[in-house]
Image (spheres, rainbow, N blue to C red):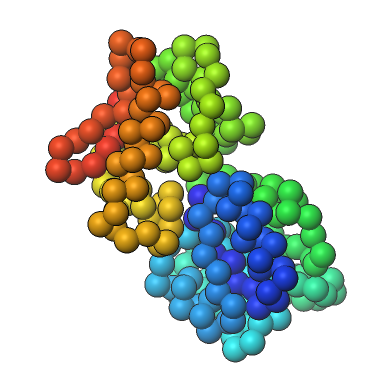
Amino acid sequence: MKVLLVEDEKKISDFVVKGLREQGYVVELAEDGNDGYLHATSQSYDVIVLDIMLPGRDGLSILKMLRKGGNTVPVILVTARGELDERLEGLNLGADDYLTKPFYLDELVARIQAVHRRSSGQSLSLLQVEDLLVSLTNREVKRAGEIVELTTREFNLLEYLMRSPGRVMTRTQILEQVWGYDFDPSTNVVDVCVQRLRKKIDAGHDVQLIETVRGAGYRMKKA
């Protein structure tokens, strides 16, 4: 899942970015309202975590402009203040949820997952292709009943492929969704990660689930 965090307080942004990335999210940070609005309107995100009090454009004006422009990305508003009027204004402008500082990272993660499920219509916490099972709740992977230990990046790659079985994902798409924009598209990091994932998922099994489409990319075998 790709998240945009718009937050100008460095202690909070460092804490949230580090915590979300450890949970497997692709996170991009904007440290003022103008930069946040530019990110939100020029790139695609699954969820935006938006502070209200920002230099430049404030969070409520950003939210208002996004909704006026037809952008329906889920937005969680964050503020140090807890006044009812401000909270209602944000919700009336189209915010999907609201958090008051200070907050626990686990609470933010739960809210991100909840608004993303609502917006995408996803209710499943279990993905399955053939005898490969992935639990999104506890991030557990099993092949033929045996637990498969994966790194965070390997898990994110597997989840991305399993969400669209049979669909070819290009290296650029995988880089964008699993790594974010931290890597040069010419790097072979995707191929290396796919090779590691194959060794853990497909080795020793008659049916190979992760397929290479020559000249195009990779796909998960369609059940």
| Quadrant in the picture for residue 169 | top left
Query: Where is residue 201 shown, x and y percent of the image?
Result: 41, 23
Q: Residue furthest bottom?
A: 56
Would residue 115 be visible to someone looking at this image?
no
Q: Residue furthest right?
A: 83
Q: Residue at x 59, y 33 (%)?
A: 139
146 or 34, which is in the foreground? Answer: 146
**From the viewer's perspective, is 127 left or right of 165?**
right
Query: Where is residue 68 shown, x and y percent of the image?
Result: 50, 76
Would residue 168 be visible to someone looking at this image?
yes
Quadrant of the frame with the C terminus: top left
Q: Residue at x 40, y 72 (%)?
A: 42
Query: Where is residue 85 shown, x and y percent of the image?
Result: 81, 76
Q: Is residue 160 above or below residue 47?
A: above
Q: Residue at x 34, y 48 (%)?
A: 189
**From the viewer's perspective, is 94 left or right of 148?**
right
**From the viewer's perspective, is 58 left or right of 84?**
left
